[in-house]
Image (tube, coloured by chain):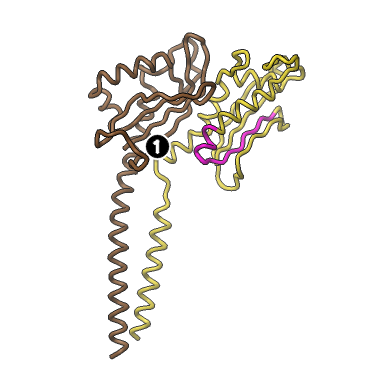
Chain colours: A brown, B yellow
Amino acid sequence: MTETIGIIIVFSILIIMALLFFTRIQTNSVEQQRTLISGEKAVSISFSALFLPELECTKAGSDDIKDCIDVLKADAATEVIAANPEYYFKLFGYSTIVIQEIYPTPNEKILYERTRNGQPPTEDTQKARTPIPVSLYNPVTGTYAFGVLTIDSY
Amino acid sequence: MGLAIVVLLISLAFLFVIQFTITNSKEEPQQLFARKQLAHNTLSTMVSTTTACLDLTVKDLIQDCMDIIQEYDCNDDGRPDSCATAEEVITTILDQTLKEWQKNYFFYIQLGQNEEMQIQNGECPGSKDQGVAFIPTRGGRSQITATLEVC
């Protein structure tokens, strides 16, 4: 009798633990699925941004410099993107694209930003981040800075 | 008999948890993409970067550094310092990117078979992705190889 009661108690504990475990797995897998989709989108957005004619370097003979962004074009592109949000939403979706200069003069510029809730992203906002090192070409001085194009996909 | 079944159930539950933990540590596509292109992109971008030294690129500084007679004097003290300047710029860039992203790396420059410069952050015992840039020497006698390994 005592053994039966003991087994029922242990069995009930096991069932409760299993239920908690499966609930957690379910929650995690939904979050993972969302991160996975965000990740795939981040890769796709990074290609779109890198080969965007509004940003790409067009210096004659610069074919050998891959992953290059023209900083003057980027300045103009920021205004164009802000003025045509629906067109660029089709390209970039819910994401933040930042061009960051690392060397020689550290600074950063937000090229595009759109979150799901319309609020600026916080540290807790779930995202898939893809940083891509890029050359930042200044056609006036003819110099190349070291930069990073960061894509946060939500 | 009842206790044996309970022990069996607990063992099965543990096996299930372990299996779930192992299969869940898979790399996501964007992580794989970012990792694969990181070493190559960082190196190729870094080599073509214009430095504050006489508007020379990192590639120019490396070429001068590997030459028998060095020419460029970046701080105007009458002594050529292309090696020190190249190392400083490369360290700054790698510190602000890979180190900031908590990635271990090993950067080195070889002239022919000889290793001439090394910049390292942490150990790199496991798998790594490699980016290589080939730079001709000024005289064209030999080849400089810049390699960046990201762990």
Q: Residue at x 30, y 67 (%)?
A: A18
Residue B140 position, x and y percent, is 69, 17
Indicate the position of residue A123 as horizontal and vertical percent values: 37, 40
Which residue type does callout 1 highlight? Arg
Residue B42: image x %, image y %? 52, 29
Q: Residue beneath label 1, please?
A: A129
**Which residue is situated farthest in the bottom direction here?**
A1
Quadrant for the N terminus of chain A, please.
bottom left
SS of the residue at dot 1? strand
Image quadrant where residue B112 sits: top right
Residue A8 located left or right of residue A39: left
Q: Residue at x 41, y 35 (%)?
A: A130
> Residue at coordinates 55% horizontally, 25% vertically from top-left?
B46
Residue A91, compared with residue A128, is above or below; it is: above
Chain of the residue under the numbered disc 1 shown in the image: A
| Residue B105: % across, % down | 58, 38
Span shown in magenta: B96-110
Residue at (60%, 39%) from the top-left corner? B121
Q: Is residue B149 left or right of residue A117?
A: right
Name above or below for residue A20 compared with residue A53. below
Please say whether residue B99 is one of the residues in the magenta stretch. yes
* Closer to the camera in the image, A108 or B129: A108
How many labels sit on residues? 1
Judge the density around disc 1: few (<14), some (14-19), many (≥20) Cα neighbours within 10 Å.
many
Q: Is residue B23 on the magenta stretch? A: no
The quarter of the image holding the C terminus of chain A is: top left
Residue B106 placement: quadrant? top right
Is the residue B55 above or below the residue A18 in the image? above
